[in-house]
Amino acid sequence: MLADAENELISLIKSSPLGAKLRDVSSLPDLSGESLVTKFANDAPAIYLAAGSVQVVDRSARPRFGVACVARNSRGHSAARLGDGAGPIGLYEMIESAAGLIDGAFAGGSTWRITAIDFMADEILYKAGVYVGVVQIETYGTVDLPAPVDEEALDQFLTFHADTDIPPHETTAEHSKWLQEPPDQAASKPDAEDQVWLGQ
């Protein structure tokens, strides 16, 4: 779900008129500190995508992404923010174009909406002449979680066993001991046990 969304959002930006004005559109690099700022300075103007939080309730998900717009202009800080008509795209135009492109767009099986625009204020960015604004986006969808085991590869069950623990509950560590073969019930034991042998 997240990989498809990120890849399709990147493709959406790359194939747009905005993408033609950028040097790079990709996933946020796995860098930090001065290394990341150096990459930003070398690659600007650029857009990088990064997954944010994903709220999941009853298999309904609300994934969030940050669309980091990175601008730099050798003519100075004002030109980096506003653009100068002759050099690279300015930060504000990049943000407005990205927001207009993505708000309501369909990517990764979902329709996206803009929730906020944040500006990064950091001395290390300022000294490098780099300006960064992040367009916050989110969508809604369902989560298709993979099965923990391949059910097709399982044999028919021959035995069903259940341990019941009623309040006050034992710890998870004690529950794990009950599942051992043979069960370790030295410190505690289930309040009820049920075992059924199934015919073949």
Image (cartoon, rainbow, N blue to C red):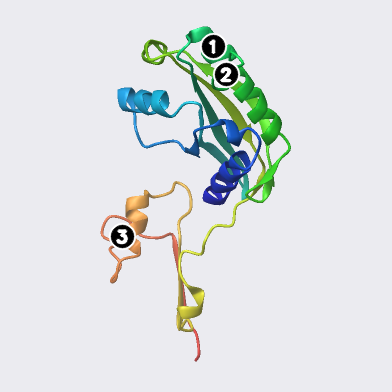
Q: Between 132 and 1, which is closer to the camera in this rendering? A: 132
Q: Which residue is drawn at 64% across and 30% down?
A: 98
Q: Residue at x 28, y 63 (%)?
A: 184
* For residue 142, side relative to residue 161 (left or right): right
Within-10-Å neighbours for mark 1: few <14, some 14–19, many 20+: many
Dot label at residue 79? 1
Q: Between 183 and 24, which is closer to the camera in this rendering? A: 24
Asked if marks 1 and 2 touch (Cβ < 8 Å), the reply is yes
Q: Position of residue 135 (x, y in %)?
A: 59, 27
Q: Mark 3 points at which residue?
A: 177
> Can you say whether 195 is above or below 61 in the image?
below
Q: Position of residue 25 (x, y in %)?
A: 51, 37
Q: Which amino acid does label 3 sit on?
A: Lys
Query: Which of the 4 quarters of the picture holds residue 15?
Result: top right
Residue at the extreme right: 104
Q: Between 165 and 62, which is closer to the camera in this rendering? A: 62
